[in-house]
Amino acid sequence: MGRTKRRQILIALGLVMFMGIAVYLRLWTIDYRISSNDSELLRREFDLANREAMDESAEWRRRYDLEAEKAAKCSRELEEIKKSRGATTKVSAVLNRNMEMLQKENMDLLERVESLKQELEAEKLKCSMRHM
Protein backbone atom coordinates (compact mmCIF):
# COMPACT_ATOMS: atom_id res chain seq x y z
CA MET A 1 0.00 0.00 0.00
CA GLY A 2 2.83 2.39 0.77
CA ARG A 3 4.48 1.63 -2.57
CA THR A 4 1.32 2.29 -4.52
CA LYS A 5 0.74 5.63 -2.84
CA ARG A 6 4.36 6.66 -3.44
CA ARG A 7 4.10 5.63 -7.10
CA GLN A 8 0.89 7.66 -7.50
CA ILE A 9 2.55 10.72 -5.95
CA LEU A 10 5.57 10.38 -8.27
CA ILE A 11 3.33 9.98 -11.32
CA ALA A 12 1.26 13.01 -10.26
CA LEU A 13 4.45 15.04 -9.65
CA GLY A 14 5.83 14.03 -13.07
CA LEU A 15 2.54 14.97 -14.75
CA VAL A 16 2.46 18.36 -13.00
CA MET A 17 6.09 19.01 -14.02
CA PHE A 18 5.35 18.03 -17.61
CA MET A 19 2.32 20.35 -17.72
CA GLY A 20 4.36 23.18 -16.19
CA ILE A 21 7.09 22.77 -18.82
CA ALA A 22 4.46 22.71 -21.58
CA VAL A 23 2.86 25.93 -20.30
CA TYR A 24 6.28 27.58 -20.00
CA LEU A 25 7.23 26.62 -23.56
CA ARG A 26 3.89 27.90 -24.85
CA LEU A 27 4.35 31.26 -23.11
CA TRP A 28 7.92 31.46 -24.37
CA THR A 29 6.87 30.91 -28.01
CA ILE A 30 4.12 33.56 -27.69
CA ASP A 31 6.61 36.03 -26.20
CA TYR A 32 9.18 35.18 -28.89
CA ARG A 33 6.70 35.89 -31.71
CA ILE A 34 5.74 39.22 -30.12
CA SER A 35 9.40 40.13 -29.54
CA SER A 36 10.44 39.34 -33.11
CA ASN A 37 7.58 41.48 -34.47
CA ASP A 38 8.42 44.35 -32.16
CA SER A 39 12.16 44.35 -32.85
CA GLU A 40 11.75 46.19 -36.17
CA LEU A 41 9.45 48.75 -34.55
CA LEU A 42 11.90 49.25 -31.69
CA ARG A 43 14.78 49.64 -34.15
CA ARG A 44 12.89 52.34 -36.07
CA GLU A 45 11.98 54.17 -32.85
CA PHE A 46 15.59 54.02 -31.70
CA ASP A 47 16.83 55.41 -35.03
CA LEU A 48 14.31 58.24 -34.82
CA ALA A 49 15.29 59.07 -31.23
CA ASN A 50 18.96 58.92 -32.18
CA ARG A 51 18.45 61.38 -35.06
CA GLU A 52 16.52 63.73 -32.78
CA ALA A 53 19.27 63.58 -30.17
CA MET A 54 21.92 64.35 -32.79
CA ASP A 55 19.91 67.33 -34.04
CA GLU A 56 19.51 68.63 -30.52
CA SER A 57 23.20 68.13 -29.82
CA ALA A 58 24.08 70.05 -32.99
CA GLU A 59 21.82 72.91 -31.90
CA TRP A 60 23.50 73.11 -28.47
CA ARG A 61 26.92 72.97 -30.13
CA ARG A 62 25.94 75.86 -32.43
CA ARG A 63 24.82 77.92 -29.41
CA TYR A 64 28.05 77.14 -27.59
CA ASP A 65 30.15 78.14 -30.63
CA LEU A 66 28.31 81.46 -30.96
CA GLU A 67 28.86 82.31 -27.30
CA ALA A 68 32.52 81.27 -27.46
CA GLU A 69 32.99 83.44 -30.56
CA LYS A 70 31.48 86.45 -28.76
CA ALA A 71 33.77 85.92 -25.77
CA ALA A 72 36.83 85.64 -28.03
CA LYS A 73 35.85 88.84 -29.87
CA CYS A 74 35.55 90.71 -26.58
CA SER A 75 38.94 89.41 -25.48
CA ARG A 76 40.53 90.58 -28.75
CA GLU A 77 38.96 94.02 -28.39
CA LEU A 78 40.20 94.22 -24.82
CA GLU A 79 43.74 93.37 -25.91
CA GLU A 80 43.59 95.99 -28.68
CA ILE A 81 42.45 98.60 -26.18
CA LYS A 82 45.23 97.66 -23.78
CA LYS A 83 47.80 98.02 -26.55
CA SER A 84 46.49 101.34 -27.80
CA ARG A 85 46.14 102.84 -24.33
CA GLY A 86 48.01 105.87 -23.09
CA ALA A 87 47.57 108.74 -25.62
CA THR A 88 46.06 111.37 -23.33
CA THR A 89 44.37 111.45 -19.98
CA LYS A 90 40.98 112.05 -21.54
CA VAL A 91 41.44 109.31 -24.12
CA SER A 92 42.87 107.10 -21.41
CA ALA A 93 39.80 107.63 -19.22
CA VAL A 94 37.49 106.76 -22.15
CA LEU A 95 39.56 103.72 -22.93
CA ASN A 96 39.53 102.64 -19.31
CA ARG A 97 35.76 102.96 -19.23
CA ASN A 98 35.48 101.00 -22.49
CA MET A 99 37.89 98.40 -21.15
CA GLU A 100 35.84 97.99 -17.97
CA MET A 101 32.67 97.62 -20.01
CA LEU A 102 34.35 95.05 -22.24
CA GLN A 103 35.72 93.19 -19.25
CA LYS A 104 32.26 93.09 -17.71
CA GLU A 105 30.74 91.95 -21.00
CA ASN A 106 33.51 89.39 -21.36
CA MET A 107 32.80 88.02 -17.88
CA ASP A 108 29.09 87.88 -18.65
CA LEU A 109 29.78 86.04 -21.89
CA LEU A 110 32.13 83.61 -20.18
CA GLU A 111 29.47 82.89 -17.57
CA ARG A 112 26.95 82.37 -20.38
CA VAL A 113 29.34 79.99 -22.14
CA GLU A 114 29.77 78.07 -18.89
CA SER A 115 26.01 77.85 -18.35
CA LEU A 116 25.58 76.67 -21.94
CA LYS A 117 28.22 74.01 -21.32
CA GLN A 118 26.28 72.83 -18.28
CA GLU A 119 23.00 72.84 -20.19
CA LEU A 120 24.64 70.88 -22.99
CA GLU A 121 25.91 68.28 -20.53
CA ALA A 122 22.48 68.09 -18.91
CA GLU A 123 20.82 67.57 -22.29
CA LYS A 124 23.36 64.91 -23.24
CA LEU A 125 22.67 63.14 -19.96
CA LYS A 126 18.93 63.43 -20.50
CA CYS A 127 19.27 62.00 -24.01
CA SER A 128 21.43 59.11 -22.80
CA MET A 129 18.91 58.36 -20.04
CA ARG A 130 16.09 58.31 -22.62
CA HIS A 131 17.92 55.70 -24.66
CA MET A 132 18.37 53.38 -21.71
Image (tube, rainbow, N blue to C red):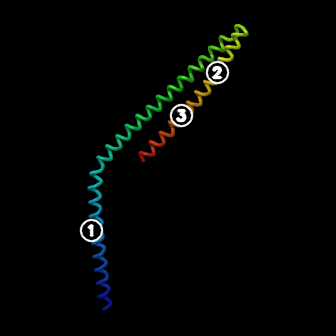
Image quarter (top left, top right, bottom left or bottom right) of the N terminus: bottom left
Marks 2, 3: nearer the viewer: 2
Mark 2 and mark 1 lie on one chain; the one further toward the N terminus is: 1
Tell me residue 123's x, y (percent): 48, 39
Marks 2, 1: nearer the viewer: 2
**Residue identified by numbered label 1:** 22
For residue 59, the mark is none
Q: Residue type at mark 3?
A: Lys
Mark 2 and mark 3 lie on one chain; the one further toward the N terminus is: 2
CA–CA distance between discs 3 and 1?
Answer: 57 Å
Q: Residue type at mark 1?
A: Ala
CA–CA distance between discs 2 and 3?
Answer: 24 Å
- Callout 3 crowding tier (Cα within 10 Å): few <14, some 14–19, many ≥20: some
* Mark 3 residue element: helix
Q: Residue type at mark 2?
A: Met
Q: Is residue 123 above or below residue 64?
A: below
Closer-to-camera residue (34/81): 81
Closer-to-camera residue (124/86): 86
Check the image and name the residue furthest to the right.
89
Tell me the residue at 56%/30% (across/down): 112
Relative to 20, 52 lies left or right:
right
Marks 3, 1: nearer the viewer: 3
Q: Is residue 43 above or below residue 55?
A: below
Q: Is residue 13 above or below residue 34?
A: below
Tell me the residue at 29%/58% (across/down): 31
Tell me the residue at 27%/76% (across/down): 15
For residue 101, the mark is 2
**Residue identified by numbered label 3:** 117
